[in-house]
Amino acid sequence: METPCNEHETQIQANTRDITELQSEIKFKEKRIDDIYNKIEKMDEKIDKLNENMNRIIQSSIQSDNDIEKRLVAMETKIKENEKAVQDNRNRFTVILSVITIFFTALTFIFNFLLK
């Protein structure tokens, strides 16, 4: 028969095995937590780099937009100047054509008057 001491010894040994298993499991989980923490730190660094790159891209885009806007304003100004020049040329041509027409009309009246 087993004595209470033997029973306690068996329980102590069982508890010791359980404690050893739990300690191994704790060490494994601590290592996993450390690995996860390291991965999170690496991801934070990558996210920071990504944010920096996005900020540079946004700034570059804003600069490009400003450049495009300046070029567009310059083109619009040139188009308006060209349209004004075309209109001025049309007006000048119309005036010259009117003067020539009046000149030939007057010349026609003079020839008609002299020939009568």
Image (tube, helix red, strand yellow):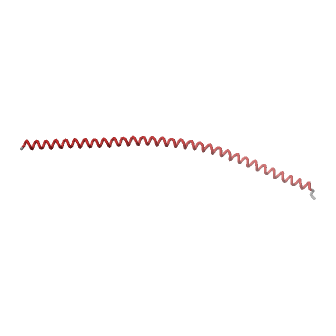
Q: Position of residue 78 (x, y in %)?
A: 36, 41
Which residue is at the front of the view, 9 or 71?
A: 71
The answer to whether 82 appears left or right of 109 in the picture is: right
Residue 72 lies, in percent from the top left, at 41, 43
Image quadrant holding the C terminus, namely top left
Q: Is residue 57 left or right of residue 73?
A: right
Quadrant of res 105: top left
Query: How far across and down, in percent of the image, does residue 97 sit?
Result: 21, 43
Quadrant (top left, top right, bottom left, bottom right) of the N terminus: bottom right
Location of residue 81 with respect to 26 vertically, above or below: above
Q: Is residue 25 left or right of residue 48?
A: right
**Number of numbered discs:** 0
The structure residue drawn at horizontal position 28% and vertical position 41%, both measured from the top left corner, is 88
Name the residue located 81 percent from the left edge and 52 percent from the top edge.
18
Q: Quadrant of residue 53?
A: top right
Q: Residue at 10%, 42% (x, y): give it.
A: 111
Q: Residue at x 43, y 42 (%)?
A: 69
Residue 54 x/y as whole percent: 55, 44
- Residue furthest to the left: 116
